[in-house]
Amino acid sequence: MSEGIGEVVAGGGQEAPDNAPEVSVRTTSTLLLYFERTYGVERLQALWARNDIPLSLEYLRTHANYISLRFLERFSTLLMKESGDAHFMRNAGLFLATPEAMGFAYYLLRAFGSPRMCYLKTIELAPSYNRVGSFHVEFLEQKQLVLTYSSKTPETSRNICELRMGQFASIPTIWGLLPAEVRESECQVLGAPTCRYHLAWADPMSQWGHHLGLLLGTVSGLVVGALGWAHPLFSVASLAAAGFSMGGWLDGRRELKRKDEALRSQNQAIMGSLVELQQRYDEIFRANVALEDRVTERTQALKEANGKLGDALVRQQELDRLKSEFFDNVSHELRTPLTLILLTLESLERRGEENNPEVVMQHVTTMERSAQRLLRLINNLLDLAQLESGKARLRYQPLELNGFLSTVLPPFHAMADRQGVFLRLEGREVTPVEVDHERMDIVFQNLLSNALKFTQTGGVTVRVLEDEKDVLVDVEDTGQGISQQDTQVIFDRFAQADNSGTRRFGGTGIGLALVKETLELHSGGIAVTSELGKGSIFRVRLPKGRAHIREDLRERRRAEMPVRRDRRISGSFPSLDTGVPDNGRASVVAPARDHAGPGPEAPRILVVEDDVEIRGFIAGLLKQHYRVLEAVNGEEGRQRAIAERPDLIVSDVMMPVLSGLQMLVALREQTATVDIPVILLTARQEVSAKVEALGTGANDYLGKPFSPRELLARIETQLRLREAAVRSAENERLAAIGLLTSGFAHEVRNPLNGLMNALAPLKEVLVDNANTPDAEMSRAMVEVMEECGQRIRHLAESLLSFTRTSDTPMMLSLDSLLDSTLGVLTWKVPSGVVVERAYECTVPVQGDPGSLNQVWLNLLDNALRAVGEHGRVRVATACQGDEAVVTISDDGVGIRSEDMERLFQPFFSTRAAGEGTGLGLALSRRIILRHGGRIQVHSTPGKGTQVEVHLPLRPPGRSSSGNGADGQGESRVGRLG
């Protein structure tokens, strides 16, 4: 408050002085008087002492003095701020109509005046106390007044307006009336040309009774005095007083009557208000009841909506899980033939150039490079699925990144040299960080591969830095750069910076996602800065110290298993080989022991092995991940499997009492154990042994020596496949995998084409060199590679067909389609099988010939497989109403009733492991549904199967591919995949 009024005036420039003759101090005297009466004179004096107010209190109390309008505005603001009352100015204005403020004029007006007269006099005398403003009367009645006020010096504060309205409102209170109603419709401070005020008031009761009584009493006193009845002075005084009193009594009675009437009218108004309030209350009550009902309804609706949202969330989470597990399962399926291909190529390389011509070694190198690229893709998918499922575990070990990167870069120098760009490492030794070495290798291999792939000129620089908290690695390239919008998504799964059909560089869009999620698993991160045409910088951040280590992610291993970088490339693993053949059994059979495993929720694995060392090794390997049961021979294994129903069985083949194959046959004959996955282990490597094992019903077959990691991977694959067999309906599964399977299959086919294209010239070279040593062995190896490649190609083509649709339907003859398909399968029909045709429907149907041929091919192939070497297959067509019915029946082995419910589930197959993908009938059902039809299966075990396909004769509408109709499609031919 120290800056006060004085400083404001000092900075006022051309403003009038504070004592300018603009407004009379009688205006401020009302403010001062009200402040003193309300807050005390001491506080007013203290206010003057604290603030630099140029004019003294004595000056403001002298009515002959004047002040400027600006001083009045600042002074009123100061008083209002000191009081802390937002209505201070209005209340101060109301204080005008008091004896203290008006003096003798108050009593004079009360005796002889009226509000109307007072308002007019106030307006008339305004120039005497306000020389900068003027009033103008626009409308005047007995109890109403509309007037305007304009000021030559524009007012800047609403405080003066509030003071003026309070003064206008106070005038009726002189006569004991309520304050006048004052309304301001326009205001100069708010931009109007004038201030316009609307006043309304009540007039005081006239006092004619007193005056009349006084007059009559005086006249009567004069008459009595004139008649000599009493002394004139006494008679006049007494009778005048009596008349005045009588007149006052009459005035009082009239006033009481008026007030009584006013009270009566007020009472009636109050009663009316009460009635109205009661009505309003009733309305509010009814509205409240209705509102409560609506709230209840809305609450119920919200609960239902929340329930639906919860269900949708669960479904979405299930779809995400299915997506990850699908890729995991398919990747494992691909790794088996790929590993065999790589092992074969490795064998060829070991034999060296002395046994193979240079051109052969070139083809071998091309095939190995393509196979390694495909295996890296599969490994990335496996790692990504592991991260998403929350099963990733870390082996924390100290790692000095500069030295580590010096061992990572050398394999990439050859790639850089081929492209004519440089690759260099900059930096010095930094503080070691606690990380998983193998996962860091994955991170930097992905980053270096990307950087070199997109760099055509210049080069790639890897820079190692550190600060107080983190170790930083920059991978900087001079490539084509990344656009701003793409930098927002490149770390998302399956997202790529270039998704156009003409993109120059391939990829699946999972590498950077894997990098980001792996670093986040280590509490680190990755960021990118890039400019189109100039290159990109990827900065990896890894925290120092041990605070980031998560015990829930730490991998628990009792024995150290060194991890080699080339394992992710070549697929080679440390193997287990006891050196003891199956027929060299120990003479003493150790008793079996069970192992609790990591927890009660872990799957239970039954290990059946008579060799104590191998059984102990397998149990020790598995108990880190599963609950393990042991059995020392096939009979004990059969009994424990029936009694305990484990989730999976790992069994040797050659055992005393009951062999592994005999145990498998017994388990497959029991309803309780028919679906338990069984993995067989044996030292027998010949093809006939594998065929026998798989034909007996084994789910997988692993030869000795075997890789512990491979055994774990196969066990995990079988457990996931079994779990997938009982999951949600096919439409939800397809929604999760449709788009991704198509893209995945395309990416698989690219390196596969390179591998398969190299086989043809390789075979020609081997034919030309038929006389070279080991030519027969080389041809056998090439045939093995070709067979494995065909399996991968068939899986990729099935995946593509599973998601492919056609938008160009045409009119088709069922007879021609079926004959065409039978012609394709002629080579597969044994001499002892009779194929009958009965075509009775000549009406064409509308559809996609390629898709329908795929259906007939799947169904006829199933039928031929079911009848074997001898039997009958019948193909018939018929018209039933507005449908064409194609019936394919056989007298083969039939389908078990327990398999009927899962026939059309994708990836479900009753064939031996490795003989089918489980997509055939699922694909057929989807195609038929898309054509507006339906498919039905009827089967009797041992007697045969009949499949009916119903297609509309009218052009079908576009039908959803995911929803089965009429309960169709939940049965399936159980003899194929």
Image (spheres, rainbow, N blue to C red):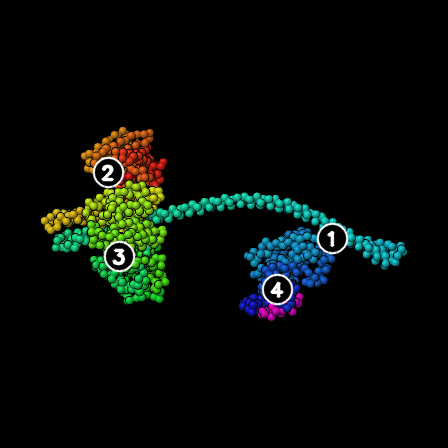
| Amino acid on which disc 4 is placed | Glu
User: Disc 2 designates what residue?
Assistant: 865
Q: Is residue 561 magenta?
A: no
Quadrant for residue 850, please give it: top left
Q: Helix, strand, or loop for circle 3? A: helix
Q: Helix, strand, or loop for circle 4? A: loop
Q: Earlier in the sequence, mark 4 or mark 2?
A: 4
The image position of residue 827, as x and y in percent, is 19, 37
| Amino acid on which disc 2 is placed | Arg
User: Can I make out residue 326 in this image?
Assistant: no
Q: Earlier in the sequence, mark 4 or mark 3?
A: 4
The reply to whether the C-beta atoms of the residues labelled 4 and 3 are less than 8 Å apart is no
| Amino acid on which disc 1 is placed | Ser
User: Disc 3 designates what residue?
Assistant: 449
Quadrant for the N terminus, please. bottom right
Residue 418 vs residue 295: left or right? left
Marks 4 and 2 sit apart, C-alpha to C-alpha, by: 117 Å
The reply to whether the C-beta atoms of the residues labelled 3 and 1 are less than 8 Å apart is no
Looking at the image, how many numbered discs can be counted on the residues?
4
> Residue 206 got which mark?
1
Q: Is residue 769 above or below residue 959?
A: below
Q: Earlier in the sequence, mark 1 or mark 4?
A: 4
The image position of residue 96, as x and y in percent, is 66, 60
| Amino acid on which disc 3 is placed | Ser
Marks 4 and 3 sit apart, C-alpha to C-alpha, by: 88 Å
For mark 4, does the 10 Å Cα neighbourhood hold few (<14), some (14 to 19), or many (20 or more) residues? many
The image position of residue 900, as x and y in percent, is 32, 38
> Residue 22 got which mark?
4
Question: In front: mark 1 or mark 4?
Answer: 1
For mark 1, does the 10 Å Cα neighbourhood hold few (<14), some (14 to 19), or many (20 or more) residues? few
Residue at x 86%, y 57% (from the top left corner)? 235
